[in-house]
Structure formats: structure tokens, C-alpha cells
Amino acid sequence: MMRAFMSADASYDGIFWTAVKTTHIFCKPSCTARKPKPENVEFFFAPKDALFAGYRACKRCAPLAIGAAPPAWVPKLIALADDATERVSARHLIARSIDPARAPAASSDRSASSIAAHRSTPRRWTRAMNR
């Protein structure tokens, strides 16, 4: 997430939001504002969470603007996580046209995490966006 934020990668808009502790502002990952020190950055999976934590919306990137839909691969990833009965590997993601580098918890041989272990995050994000 930090790499996507620091490079202002717009493909992550709607997936997560970043907040800067020193300014009390939260932004989309693609915000063009000057980037803060990494130790001053906090991540949220819903703008509502950032607001409840005391951050205000950035005036430059307008993270609360209507129409900030997640990328097309996110619903596929959520469906895959919901239907998973075993550990989801990069092979499963590629078979469904999902880039393993973009999947938030794609497991690999070097990682102990799995998408199934992080199922609550996408669902919580989906519920928050649909309210």
C-alpha cells in the first residue's frame, strides 16, 4: 500500500485511503499532494473509518467524491475469497485474471498470510461503500 501511495497509483483508488497523522488529512492513493514521511502515514479501508479517526478529507483529491468505484478486479477477488475452501495461491488469482501483485493478501511461498485470513477486510469495505 505504501508503494502505491508514494507512486500515486490511481489503480488503487477505492481500495484504500491514506491519512497523514501530522496534517489530519486523508486522501486517495492517487493524490498529487506532496508525499509525507512513511512513519506519518496511516491506511484505512473505508473513508468512514478515516473520518471517525478524526481526519478530514483532502481538498485536492476529494476522496469523498461520488463515483469512486473500485477497480474491476476487486469484486472478483472478493468472490474468490468468499468461495475459498483452501489457501488461495497466485495460480488461482492468475486463472481469474487477477494480478497477484495487486491482491492485498495473495499468498506465496514466502508469505504465511492468505486471502482467506483477510476475508473480513474486503467485506467490511464493501459494506461501508454500500451504506
Image: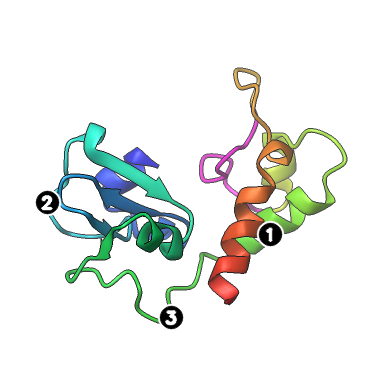
**Which of the 4 quarters of the picture holds residue 31?**
bottom left
Q: CA distance from mark 3 to mark 2?
A: 24 Å
Indicate the position of residue 83 as horizontal and vertical percent values. 84, 51
**Which of the 4 quarters of the picture holds residue 72?**
bottom right
Indicate the position of residue 88 as horizontal and vertical percent values. 75, 37
Kindly identify which residue carries mark 1. Answer: 76
- Density class for disc 3 (Cα within 10 Å; few <14, some 14-19, many ≥20) is few
Kindly identify which residue carries mark 3. Answer: 67
Indicate the position of residue 60 as horizontal and vertical percent values. 17, 69
Task: Say whether residue 99 is magenta.
Answer: yes
Depth order, front residue of 46/77: 46
| Numbered range of the magenta stretch | 97-107
Depth order, front residue of 46/80: 46
Give the residue displayed 79% in from the left and 53% down from the top.
82
Task: Say whether residue 45 is magenta.
Answer: no
Asked which secondary structure carries label 2, the reply is loop
Q: Is residue 32 left or right of residue 80?
A: left
Q: Earlier in the sequence, mark 1 or mark 2?
A: 2
Q: Earlier in the sequence, mark 3 or mark 1?
A: 3
Give the residue displayed 38% in from the left and 58% down from the top.
50
Residue furthest to the left? 34
Foreground label between 3 and 1: 3
Prevalent SS, magenta region: loop
Image quarter where the N terminus lies is top left
Say if 52 sits above or below 111 in the image.
below
Amino acid, disc 2 = Arg
Amino acid, disc 3 = Gly
Indicate the position of residue 79 as horizontal and vertical percent values. 75, 58
Say if 127 sits above or below 43 in the image.
below
Q: CA distance from mark 1 to mark 2?
A: 33 Å
Asked which secondary structure carries label 3, the reply is loop
Kindly identify which residue carries mark 2. Answer: 34
